[in-house]
Image: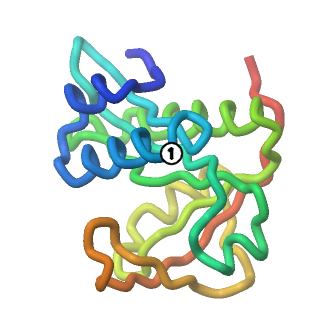
Amino acid sequence: MRITEASEREVEAFVWNAEDRQFFLDRLRRRGPKGGQVFLAIEDGRAVGYVYLRLQTAEEFKLRLFLTRAPLLERLRVREGRRLNGIGRLLVAMAEATAWERRRRRIALGVVETRPEPIPFYERLGYAEWRFGTIRTHGYGRPSAIERCRVFVKKLTPPTA
């Protein structure tokens, strides 16, 4: 298995969820590589996971205020049947290493309150919930859909070899 940065063409070919695919293509086309990067986990010629590392300033006021310049992890997904095999951990590690290379020293992510299942995974990776409460976000493609998210932050350290 390999983790690689994805081009638009690779996103179109490998990202299995249509909403995620549209989200990634929108981000790559409108914001370019300085805005963020998509990472794919490829195994036997097929994607088994992906994540978006948002490098651009957050849209949410509380994130801009308390986490200036902190990149965000968005839409981490691992295929059913391939979960609990370290793929998500490798994708997050690649995103964190990339953030570190870009001189970012913290990284954050949001977990929708109504879907808390991934929280133990992120806590095992060293993410801790911040003390500023939840934030309101707009669901992508559904501007009227407001979601409340819990925010988790990690202080980055240099990647290990």
Residue hosting label 1: 31
Residue type at the position of mark 1: Arg
In this rendered view, identify the residue nearer to me: 52 or 42. 52
Residue in view at x 51 percent, y 37 percent: 32
Residue found farthest to the top: 44
Q: Report x, y in % for residue 152.
A: 63, 66
- Indicate whether 21 appears above or below 141: above
Q: Report x, y in % for residue 139.
A: 34, 73
Q: Report x, y in % for residue 78.
A: 32, 41
- The answer to whether residue 86 is visible is no
Is 137 on the left or on the right of 128, as rendered? Answer: left
Residue 14, quarter of the rendered image:
top left
Q: Report x, y in % for residue 156.
A: 78, 45
Residue in view at x 27 percent, y 27 percent: 47
In this rendered view, identify the residue nearer to me: 90 or 99. 99
- Indicate whether 5 appears above or below 31: above
Is 127 on the left or on the right of 81, as rendered? Answer: right
